Amino acid sequence: MSLFGQYDDFFTDSFNKHSPPLSDAYAQRVATGFRPSKPEKMDPELYDLIEWCWKQDPNERPQMKDVMECLIAIKANMEEAEEARRIRRGGGGCGCVIS
């Protein structure tokens, strides 16, 4: 199995509540273009990256350096979004109360 095949399996298993059955029939479906649908709560940017890694033509798949750059950017975006949510909920600052 190629490095990208292993990478694809990692993301599928890590982010999908119901891992796909590992069978010859399933492998044949994947070989002919089937891809699992996006889990409801998965970050859309992350799923876009996964779909890029799942391209049918191996020449259209990202290089590992591209994957790492995307993961770093996705992580930063998720952290920024979480910080913005925390601030909107009134959780900004250090938690000190100055009277």
Image (tube, helix red, strand yellow):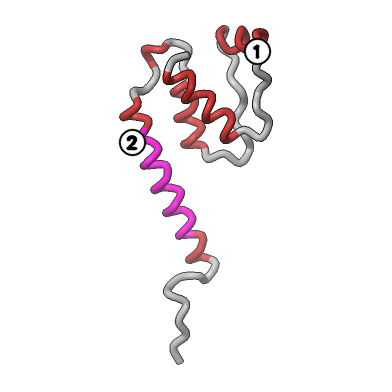
Specify the quadrant of the image occupied by residue 67.
top left
Identify the image quadrant of residue 25.
top right
Task: Check disc 2 and report its element: helix, strand or loop.
Answer: helix
Considering only vertical position in the picture, is 2 above or below 88?
above
Q: Which residue is mark 1?
A: 26
Q: Is residue 41 left or right of residue 3?
A: right
Q: Main secondary structure of the magenta part?
A: helix
Work out whether residue 19 or residue 40 is closer to the camera in this orientation and state it: 19
> Could you tell me which quadrant the C terminus lies in?
bottom left
> What x and y, as percent, mark residue 49?
45, 30
The residue lying at 48 percent from left, 18 percent from top is: 5
Residue 52 appears at what percent x and percent y?
Answer: 44, 23
* Residue 91 position in % (x across, y down): 50, 70
User: Bounds of the magenta span?
Assistant: 68-84
Residue lying furthest bottom in this view? 99
Gap in angstroms between the C-alphas marked 2 and 1: 31 Å
Which numbered disc flags the more N-terminal residue, 2 or 1? 1
Q: Is residue 78 magenta?
A: yes
Dot 1 amino acid type: Tyr
In the displayed structure, 4 sits above or below 72; it is: above
Query: Which residue is tagged 2?
Result: 69
Q: Position of residue 47 (x, y in %)?
A: 51, 32
Label 1: how many Cα within 10 Å (few below 14, some 14–19, many 20+):
few
Residue drawn at point x = 52 percent, y = 30 percent: 11
User: Looking at the image, is 43 positioned above or below residue 34?
Assistant: below
